[in-house]
Image: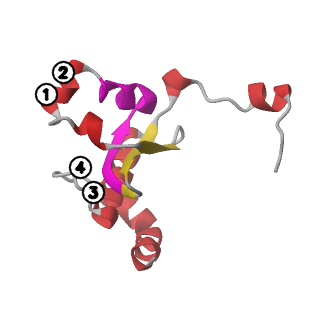
């Protein structure tokens, strides 16, 4: 196990207000929702506010952990396509719609999709 020194921690941080990527809401070790955002931490926080409770049928109560795949180098279109791919692979309970997929981005990730579906 590695113990990080102060410099390692400070020099390898990610600014919370600039975390573009895909997030996965998890309950009982199952992926129940996949989303994409320009600020994933802010988006996850929104699940806890009053308006989100109404809009998303109390989903805020239904996840016990989350995973964030930070993707600052991808375009919004690439992140949306990757989000759609994850939804197709994992079929999360609360994802009823699949976002639009860019064909060239989809083809770029196709080998990884096939590998993930086998696992």
Quarter where residue 76 is shown:
top left
Give whichever of discs 3 and 2 has the lower sequence position: 2
Which residue lies under the disc numbered 3?
92
* Mark 1–mark 3 CB contact (< 8 Å): no
Between the C-alphas of marks 1 and 4, the distance is 22 Å
| Residue at position x 46%, y 34% in the image | 20
Between the residue at mark 4 and the residue at mark 2, the CA separation in whole angstroms equals 23 Å
Q: Earlier in the sequence, mark 1 or mark 4?
A: 1
Magenta stretch in the rendered image: 31-48
Is the Cβ of the residue at disc 1 closer than 8 Å to that at disc 2? yes
Is residue 50 one of those drawn in magenta? no
Q: Which residue is mark 1?
A: 54
Q: Which residue is under mark 4?
A: 99
Judged from the image, the secondary structure of the residue bearing numbered disc 4 is loop
SS state under label 1: helix
Q: Which residue is mark 2?
A: 51
**SS for tag 3?**
loop
Q: Seen in the image, is 72 located left or right of residue 114?
A: right
Q: Nearer the viewer, mark 1 or mark 4?
A: 1
**Considering the numbered disc 2 on the image, is that residue within a helix, a strand or a loop?**
helix
């Amino acid at each position: 196990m590695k113990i990080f020194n102060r410099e390692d921690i400070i020099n390898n941080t990610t600014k919370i207000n600039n975390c573009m990527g895909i997030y996965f809401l998890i309950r009982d070790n199952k992926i129940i929702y996949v989303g994409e955002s320009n600020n994933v931490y802010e988006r996850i926080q929104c699940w806890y506010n009053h308006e989100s409770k109404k809009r998303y049928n109390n989903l805020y109560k239904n996840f016990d952990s989350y995973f964030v795949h930070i993707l600052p180098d991808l375009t919004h279109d690439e992140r949306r396509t990757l989000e759609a791919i994850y939804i197709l692979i994992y079929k999360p309970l609360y994802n009823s719609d699949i976002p639009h997929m860019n064909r060239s981005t989809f083809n770029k990730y196709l080998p990884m999709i096939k590998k993930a579906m086998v696992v």
